[in-house]
Amino acid sequence: MTKPLTISAESSEPSLARRTLLKGAAAAVAATGVTMNAALAASVAPLGQTGAPTRSTAPLPLGPLPGSRYPDSHLESAKKGPPSFGPSGFPAFAGTMAVERVATGFRWAEGPVYFAAGRYLLFSDIPNNRIMRFSEDDGHLSVYRQPSMNSNGNTIDREGRLITCEHSGRRVTRTELDGSITIIADKFNGKRLNSPNDAVVTADGAIWFTDPAYGIGGFYEGIKAEPEQDKKNVYRVDPKSGEVKVVVDDFVEPNGLAISPDEKKLYICDTGFTDGPDNPSHIRVFDLDVTGGKVSNSKVFAEMPKPSITDGVRCDTEGRVWCSVGWGDPNEDGVRCYTPSGELLGKIHIPETVANLCFGGQQRNRLYICGSTSLYAVYTSVQGAMKP
């Protein structure tokens, strides 16, 4: 790999066109009994204000969701009796709490990452070609970067720098502490990447990222183009040499990914169902060799109820796996939580398709949820793993 190219913060590239929606969108909207035209015509309120309609309810205000009498019915246990998911026993939601809508006014919210030093959350609004910033101390919402090269997944490295997957740039970048942008990866074997989607950073500084084709499928979230890579791979960028290597090459559409707190497991979502009904909609888990930069012993960790898919995934400090759900049955929209062995513990119901999530807050116990047009949050009794 050539020496990373550094771009000054002032040399942002011009705004770029958007790509088409995921192929599963039509099925998801049809499941609600609402026509596609009506769904797309729904108005979106100004930044951070009330009123963005969901597909199944009247316009929602900011704050706790309607029907949030404690214990909140949006938290569903998959088991009866301890250790259950809700306030009746499962430690992730002991006590009282409610799912809150904390910001709205987006077209497709994705890729949240929390910066503890500033107590703010960054997340992508892909079609609007911007990265948003939600300040946790006073609820202030602002634009962090526009244009963002239709950014998707974001994470943070061990030096506190933002790592971003960009659809339009077809690259993975790092925002340096002085605001300049360094290109980490944009090619493999001399050919352009498809559209990097999500990334994680291990303790050694290696960057692992997925590269499906969603960002080059149209003009809604990127720039339409023909793929140059023969496969949709998962890559690792060596922290010392910068070399980009394929670690997994048998996904239909590799999407969100997460590292277990002990760095012995790698979880990767396959959203291949968007490309055809016989393709997977699940999370796979691998044994991870961080030192050698390799994975092995692939198996399916959790199947999603088709036509829903899971787009993003995170772990807590106890190794539980939290993943987003959406695009299918509205009753499945939200978040699922699994034990490290793959047993479903429960669900968080959100009134919109959920793309991604992350833990934040001063105690790392506030789960932030990117739900289509809005940002949601719920306090938990567990902490997110240190790995973003």
Image (tube, rainbow, N blue to C red):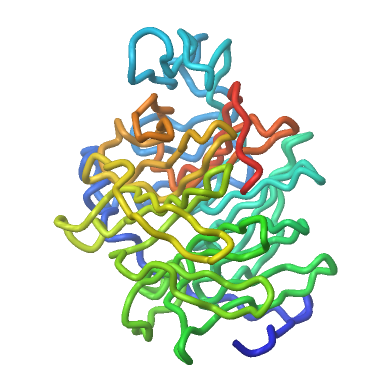
In the rendered image of this protein, does residue 31 appear above or below residue 23? above
The residue nearer to you, when weighing 103 against 248, is 248
In the rendered image of this protein, does residue 2 appear above or below residue 125? below
In the rendered image of this protein, does residue 346 appear above or below residue 330? above
In the rendered image of this protein, does residue 225 appear above or below residue 27? below
Instruction: Report the residue at 53% width, 22% height from top.
Output: 92
Q: Residue furthest left?
A: 278
Instruction: Report the residue at 34% width, 55% height from top.
Output: 297
Q: Position of residue 316 (x, y in %)?
A: 56, 35
Instruction: Report the residue at 63% width, 59% height from top.
Output: 131
- Which quadrant would residue 54 be assigned to in this image? top left
Residue 214 visible in the snapshot? no
- Which quadrant would residue 349 be assigned to in this image? top left
Q: Please identify the quadrant where the N terminus is shown.
A: bottom right
Relative horizontal placement of residue 273, taking residue 159 as reference (left or right): left
Q: Position of residue 336 (x, y in %)?
A: 40, 33
Relative horizontal placement of residue 277, taking residue 113 as reference (left or right): left
Instruction: Report the residue at 36% width, 36% height from top.
Output: 333
Q: Residue furthest right?
A: 178
Q: Position of residue 107 (x, y in %)?
A: 48, 54
